[in-house]
Amino acid sequence: MAKLLIAGGAGFIGSHTTLLLLEAGHQVVVLDNFSTSSPESLQRVAQLAGSSASARLCLVEGDIRDPGSLDQAFQTTSAPCDAVIHFAGLKAVAQSVHQPLLYWDVNVGGSQRLLAAMERHGCHTLVFSSSATVYGYPDRIPIPETAALQPINPYGHTKAAVEQMLADLASNEAGPAASGPSRWRIARLRYFNPVGAHASGRIGEDPLGPPDNLFPFVSQVAVGRRQRLKIFGADWPTPDGTGIRDYIHVMDLAEGHLAALEALWNEPPQLLTLNLGSGRGHSVLEVVQAFEAASGRPVPYDLLPRRAGDAAESVADPTEAHRRLGWRAQRDLATICSDGWHWQSLNPEGYGSGPA
Ligand code: NAD
Ligand code: UFG
């Protein structure tokens, strides 16, 4: 049993990963300020895990920018912390354009303080949530990890900056001035488009306010919470004219984190950089059709002009993650839609925490 600190563990990806870690027998301390999530997600994680596993779950309500909250999270039990998974941050592209300083403060400043706290508490194993957003407009499809990093919005710049901070940390520690090999074991995981929900339908994605992303919008239309989907662009150079993305089931993603932790623990200190995607692309219209089939509900839509900042296509080359972790996304689009619908239909208003 390892002791893990999960920053942002109440959020969409964090809650699913926390459940899997508890089921794998680990002790989990979640540090979250609930700025984009609800404590209800963790209550449901605890119920799903069962009473014996949930006894290994602890919550510290606090901000990763606050050294006192970080110290409290590291000291919650006397056992040393074996690893941190860092999900905490802000991820709305449009908001990042309007509030770049907030994004640099939370995503970059928060990460820097988290890393400083890891140093203070002698923990040098980290899994960081990066994003395919670091590739900007990709110059090839599928996108390998070696593709150029060219983010095109403040959110993407903050992810690339944290990736660089982690590389600096790892290479400085390993450099000629260091007394020995690097102590840092770091995985930078670049997620493609995380969607779907736990098969129980008890936890899932619950964005605050109108969703920016396709999947939650489609499912809120299907459940009757929103009238019509707006499809941004029907004139992309793709077979049906709509944008193509690599949708990955959130439980596949959670399993990728466990596999990354195992690799970091079992191999010498290293800086791992991996795409977590399925390697399969689906268009917006394919998603709409698959969701209609899974839900039995219509998803009416209007075709609008392209959205600023969108790329025609984004699909991962997931070969390296399979080679290094033995991990592969298992769940297809039909499963993603049926699990997503199960969550949305059981919880039409999500956790009931945010404005409609
Ligand atoms: P989310 O908003 O559901 O979860 C983020 C969690 O972090 C929330 O629980 C929030 O309350 C918490 N948080 C935010 N700021 C905090 C702070 N200062 N201190 C403590 N807690 C804080 O988002 P998610 O979809 O679960 O994303 C998790 C991570 O994965 C993020 O870093 C995001 O940038 C990254 N990511 C997400 C996607 C995606 O499409 N969902 C894609 C690529 C990368
Ligand atoms: N789309 C619509 N209507 C909507 C929302 C989206 O047609 O209401 C289209 C988009 O134009 C795009 C596709 O659906 O073609 C997917 O859009 P999302 O907003 O769901 O996802 P993105 O690929 O644009 O971006 C998301 C996150 C980024 C992250 C990226 C890769 O918002 O932060 O996935 O992880 F970087």
Image: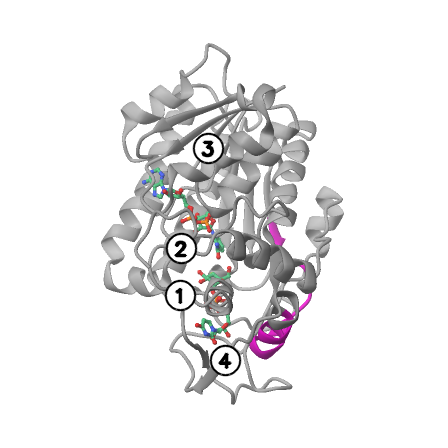
- Callout 2 secondary element: loop
Q: Is the residue indicated by label 1 positioned so its CB lies within 8 Å of ligand 2?
A: yes
> Disc 4 vs disc 1: which is toward the camera?
4
User: Disc 4 to disc 1, how far (Cα)?
Assistant: 17 Å
**Disc 3 to disc 4, C-alpha distance:** 34 Å
Residue found at x 35% / y 55%: 208
The residue that mark 2 highlights is 207
Residue type at mark 3 is Gln
- Of marks 3 and 1, which one's residue comes earlier in the chain? 3
Disc 3 designates what residue?
Answer: 43
- Cα separation between marks 3 and 2: 18 Å
Q: Earlier in the sequence, mark 4 or mark 2?
A: 2
- The residue pinned by badge 1 equals 212
* Spot occupied by residue 163 in the image (x, y as percentages of width and height): 46, 48
Magenta segment: 274-290
Asked whether mark 4 and ligand 2 are closer than 8 Å, the reply comes as no
- Mark 1 surroundings: few (<14), some (14-19) or many (≥20) residues within 10 A: few
